[in-house]
Image (cartoon, helix red, strand yellow):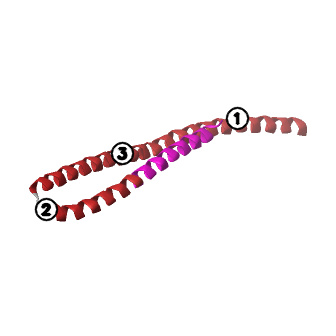
Amino acid sequence: MTLLEEGNVILSRENAILSRENKILSRENEILILVRTRFSIVKTSWERDTSREYEILSRENELLSREDEILSRENQILSRENEIPSRENVILSRQNAILSRENKILSHENEIISRWNETLHR
């Protein structure tokens, strides 16, 4: 397997991971929106009751904690995305080295063919 193919496999796997994490985050975001909507409806009806207000604040704190977790996951995903260009640079550097070697080999072959042609024309 060539370095380019290996790089493609790595990028494909990371893309699949990012896609799955994105789906998870989307689902969690939908749940958060629903919970916040329900929370605001409940909040207005419970504002008169101080013991209920404590429950609301507690739930809000839970939601904020959950939001922090989601933001942390998004940060991890962004970190992984930032690693991809450096991996691509490593792959491109390896490809460049391979192409450079191939160029030297072709140049050497060209030189041999040129000498052979000179020998044939004499």
The 10 Å Cα crowd at callout 3, few under 14, some 14 to 19, many 20 or more, is some
Q: Is residue 62 among the parts visible in the rendering?
A: yes
The 10 Å Cα crowd at callout 2, few under 14, some 14 to 19, many 20 or more, is few
Q: Tell me if 100 is positioned left or right of 120 in this view.
A: left
Q: Tell me if 121 is positioned left or right of 76 in this view.
A: right
- Res 45 quadrant in image: bottom left
Quadrant that contains the C terminus = top right
- Amino acid marked by disc 2: Glu
Image coordinates of residue 76 in percent, x first then y, are 37, 43
How far apart marks 1 and 3 lie (CA) works out to: 48 Å
Image coordinates of residue 39 in percent, x first then y, are 24, 59
Q: Which of marks 1 and 3 is in front?
A: 3
Q: Residue at x 56, y 37 (%)?
A: 94
Q: Which residue is labeled 3 in the image? A: 73
Q: Which residue is drawn at 11% across and 53% down?
A: 51
Q: Which residue is labeled 2 in the image? A: 47
> Magenta: predominant secondary structure element?
helix
Q: Do the residues labelled 1 and 3 touch (CB within 8 Å)?
A: no
- Amino acid marked by disc 3: Arg
Helix or strand or loop: what does disc 3 sit on? helix
Q: Tell me if 121 is positioned left or right of 86 in this view.
A: right
